[in-house]
Amino acid sequence: MNPLLQHLPQRAVGLVLLLAAMVAYEPGDSALLQRLFIPLLMAAAAAMLVQNVAAVALGALLLAAIHSDLGSQDWVRGQAYPALALLAGVILLAALGRRFRRRILDTREARWAPRRRGADEPPAAGQQETGAGSHRSGRT
């Protein structure tokens, strides 16, 4: 299946949610719905649309950090945005760590696959196997 069409229903729902949130968003409004819940809805819709948790976490981290003010009396700017930035940072680090680990394991497997195939084959005529723990890399 075409990778672009693989998650088409989720992407379509994400696009509709994002458009609805953009229409409903009033930047100057001080209501909790406008300051916290609609931006969270936008982040969820963006995650559905792009299918990339790391990209959405990076965007959420940056936006929440920019709007944070730890000394503010307003609990949204003083507590909610910093908590969201911290949560997005943890999610971003976990996603990047998982990708890094998967890449390392794939590289290790690709490097060891020829060696394993070589160990499964019987020694060619004239070659001796020197022991169970020896490597037959061709180097002396």
Image (cartoon, rainbow, N blue to C red):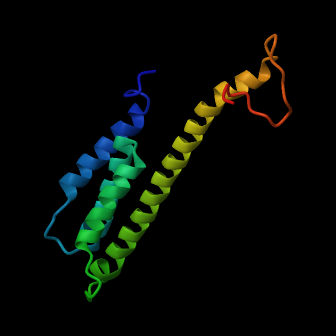
Q: Residue at x 40, y 64 (%)?
A: 89
Residues 109 and 42: in front is 109
Q: Nearer the viewer, residue 91 or 122?
A: 122
* Residue that appears at 23% across and 72% down: 67
Q: Nearer the viewer, residue 123 or 13?
A: 123
| Residue 82 horizontal/vertical position (percent) | 34, 75
Which residue extends farthest left? 28
Left or right: where 12 falls relative to 28: right
Q: Position of residue 4 (x, y in %)?
A: 37, 28
From the viewer's perspective, is residue 8 above or below residue 34?
A: above
Most distant residue in the front direction: 140
Q: Nearer the viewer, residue 72 or 107?
A: 107
Residue 135 is situated, as x and y percent measured from the top left of the image, at 74, 32
**Which residue is farthest top?**
125
How many dots with numbers? 0
Q: Quadrant of residue 13?
A: top left
Which residue: 41% across, 27% down?
A: 3
The quadrant where residue 5 appears = top left
Q: Quick one: which residue is furthest to the right in this view?
A: 131
Placement of 113 over or under 34, stated as above or below: above
Measuring 32% from the left and 48% from the top, which residue is drawn there?
Answer: 46
* Image location of residue 42, percent across then percent down: 30, 55
Report which quarter residue 118 is drawn in: top right
Q: Is residue 86 above or below residue 55?
A: below
Q: The C terminus appears in which quarter of the rendering? A: top right
